[in-house]
Amino acid sequence: MKKTLNKFIAALTAAVMITGCSANTESSAGADISAGSGAEQTVSSGDVSSEDGADDLSSASLEEADPVDTDTPDNSESTESTESADIEPDTDTPNSTEASQTSASETVPATEETEMSENVKYIALTFDDGPNTTTTNEVIDKLEKYDIVASFFLVGNNINEESAKAVKRAYDMGCEINNHSRTHSNMSGFTPEEIKEEYDFVDEKVFEITGEHTKFFRPPYISVSEVMLDNIDVPFIAGIGANDWEDKVTAEHRARLILRQAKDGDIILLHDAEGNSQTVEALDTIIPELQSQGYKFVTVSELFKIKGIGPDMEKIYTNVMQQYMYN
Ligand SMILES: [Zn+2]
């Protein structure tokens, strides 16, 4: 168990730099991860100057974090292929048949399509660091344009009377409103009381706006401690990213990074932080291209339900069908 946690934290340490958010605070992102695994060195602070530099940060480096814990057999090829064999071919007929069929019929509106047909793939678009009155609404405009839903992970201190209207607008469209902490701090060194305060503040604000509690938590910088896992009672979510907090990563490059990684069951992590217009622009490539590939966009909750998966409270999800702590 301890070993698993160490491996998990090592992976997260790498992930911190991959999915960190605001550029102004990003530099402190990985510094406080408690389990000093040395993985901080694995990923540099993300100078995405070369054309494909961001690609490396977005996915490949996750793999590099694992060798830190070389005596763990968990990540052996044989284990992976055996375990994933149970899940992946069964995408459309999950093991817990009863639960998944019920969920799918509840959450997916009936259309002329066969919802569980073999060609349909499901993916969840998510946006962090809002709400605001500008970029959040521009993102929602794109969702309306393509008639899809997404999930928003809010920073509590960004919620005010005006930005709350954007939250309500998204909620009324069928989007899911989730929790990204009150202050967007690296919470890995926080006490249980501080952690609960970060979570509860957002949860209460969202409940005031929508009448629903937040269902998932995205830790700022994907920085996680055991204390956080113990004191937040909803599943933790990461996602495939595109370094879209970096101004120098163009809209075209963001779209390409997401499209290159996307697969059935994935959670896409983008940002609706104020002024992040290149992500808004990238949506005009990402959404229609994935739709043309047979993807349907659903909320994070719907994604778990459709796949018949009850979230594991010890995982940080990038794909709802993942076997490991982190992807
Ligand atoms: Zn963030």
Image (cartoon, rainbow, N blue to C red):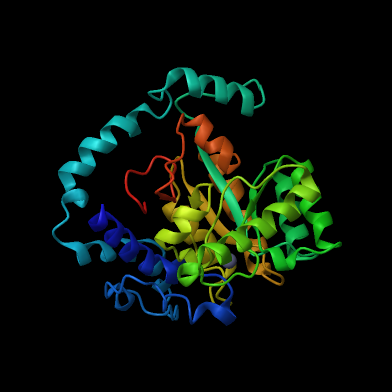
Q: Quadrant of ligand 1?
A: bottom right
Q: Residue at x 46, y 72 (%)?
A: 189
Q: Quadrant of residue 82?
A: top left
Q: Position of residue 139 (x, y in %)?
A: 71, 57
Q: Residue at x 63, y 62 (%)?
A: 197
Q: Position of residue 231 (x, y in %)?
A: 50, 55
Q: Position of residue 21 (x, y in %)?
A: 55, 70
Q: Residue at x 57, y 35 (%)?
A: 302
Front residue of 60 and 196: 196
Left or right side of 84 for 23: right
Examine the rendered structure and indicate whether residue 49 appears above or below residue 63: below
Q: Position of residue 179 (x, y in %)?
A: 62, 55
Q: Residue furthest top?
A: 98
Can residue 276 be seen by looking at this rendering? yes
Q: Quadrant of residue 14?
A: bottom left
Front residue of 1 and 267: 1
